[in-house]
């Protein structure tokens, strides 16, 4: 079981996977601390947030109800160009299955920790970032739920940058720049009840101030994962399958500074393909709507009045 608030994966099906939607790069950056040459490098920064989402999966054999996640993050410079951070997160999710004779359901709770870095490259080369994820084993409220899974440490490395478009000076309110990122995550150990590995994410987005007072951010995300099937008694190695999804989405954020902590997202899978067969039950990409509330601030080393 591995739950990542805002952009992660949940593993609860017969083969242990379900797509959690695209656009993770944008939500990952909301309220977080990225290095800059103009920062006060002596201050700690904090961020906290709540995210809830709902999927349109009423016709599927494995259905996910509303999910709720909360997180807190503390970051500080560890050099002139690098920020280190520590994050704690907790997630609650409801699941139903219509594959067994019992047609059971369960609530799932999980606590996780992350630590990582964000490094500013010279000139206009962008950023590199890395993260170690340490999820605890999930707790199923229904101990008889038939499709439980485990959790293992995951290491992720990535790169992100922005490119100014040629028309940005004349038309600064319509797609003035292109933000893009790519990341690769890898399990740090093998475990029989963990079914996902080698997660590759690519994300491209921009913004449009076309409906005041909302900033509209269209994005396209591509996610590719390796699915590890359960080991059968007649096999010495687990079979694998590649699951690939392309998602189009829209983020809506108020432009007024008093309301920038609210983010609404709609995302829709527009193309999907696998290396062998179809997407298994619980892995089918589905439309999703999510609401995020993110707040951030600064804490001085002297624990002064700056917040």
Image (cartoon, rainbow, N blue to C red):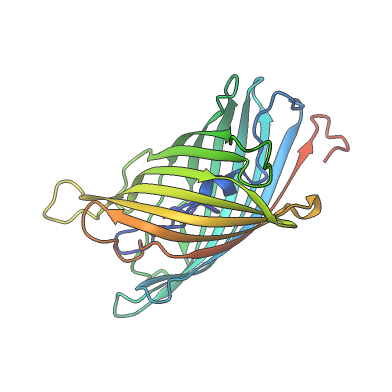
Name above or below for residue 162 compared with residue 101: above
Outermost front residue:
170
32 versus 67 height, above or below: above
Q: Is residue 67 left or right of residue 176?
A: left
Q: Provide residue 91's location: percent of width, then percent of height.
A: 55, 58
Q: Locate the N terminus by quadrant.
A: bottom left
Q: Quadrant of residue 285?
A: bottom left
Residue shown at the point (11%, 54%) measured from the top left: 234
- In the image, residue 88 sits, relative to residue 165, either above or below, namely below
Q: Position of residue 51 (x, y in %)?
A: 61, 58
Q: Report the front residue among 209 and 140.
A: 209
Q: Residue at x 54, y 41 (%)?
A: 114
Q: Which corner quadrant holds the C terminus?
A: top right
Report how many numbered discs are placed on residues in the image: 0
In the rendered view, does 38 fall on the left or right side of 34?
Answer: right
Q: Residue furthest right?
A: 305
Q: Residue at x 29, y 61 (%)?
A: 279
Residue at 34% x, 76% y: name it.
98
Please state the horizontal and vertical placement of residue 71, each as a whole percent of the image: 62, 51
Of 306 and 201, which appears nearest the observer?
201
How far across and how far down the image is residue 128, in percent? 52, 29
């Amino acid at each position: 079981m591995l739950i990542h608030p805002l952009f992660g994966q949940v593993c609860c099906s017969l083969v242990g996977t379900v797509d959690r939607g695209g656009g993770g790069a944008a939500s990952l950056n909301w309220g977080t601390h990225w290095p800059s040459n103009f920062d006060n490098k002596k201050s700690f920064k904090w961020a906290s947030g709540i995210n809830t989402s709902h999927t349109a999966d009423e016709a599927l054999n494995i259905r996910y109800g509303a999910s709720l996640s909360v997180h807190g993050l503390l970051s500080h410079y560890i050099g002139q160009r690098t920020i280190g951070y520590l994050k704690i997160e907790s997630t609650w999710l409801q699941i139903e299955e219509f594959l067994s004779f019992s047609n059971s359901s369960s609530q799932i709770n999980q606590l996780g920790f992350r630590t990582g870095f964000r490094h500013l490259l010279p000139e206009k080369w962008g950023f590199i970032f890395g993260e170690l994820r340490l999820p605890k084993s999930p707790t199923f409220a229904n101990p008889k739920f038939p499709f439980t899974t485990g959790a293992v440490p995951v290491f992720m490395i990535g790169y992100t940058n922005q490119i100014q478009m040629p028309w940005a000076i004349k038309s600064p309110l319509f797609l003035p720049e292109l933000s893009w990122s790519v990341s690769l995550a890898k399990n740090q150990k093998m475990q029989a009840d963990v079914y996902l590995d080698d997660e590759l994410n690519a994300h491209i987005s921009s913004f449009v101030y076309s409906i005041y007072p909302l900033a509209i951010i269209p994005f396209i995300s591509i996610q590719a994962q390796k699915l590890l099937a359960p080991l059968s008694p007649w096999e010495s190695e687990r079979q694998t399958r590649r699951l690939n999804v392309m998602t189009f989405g829209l983020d809506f954020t108020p432009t007024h500074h008093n309301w920038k902590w609210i983010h609404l997202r709609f995302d829709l899978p527009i193309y999907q393909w696998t290396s062998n067969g179809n997407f298994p039950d619980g892995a089918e990409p589905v439309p999703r709507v999510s609401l995020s509330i993110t707040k951030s601030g600064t804490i001085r080393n002297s624990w002064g009045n700056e917040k």
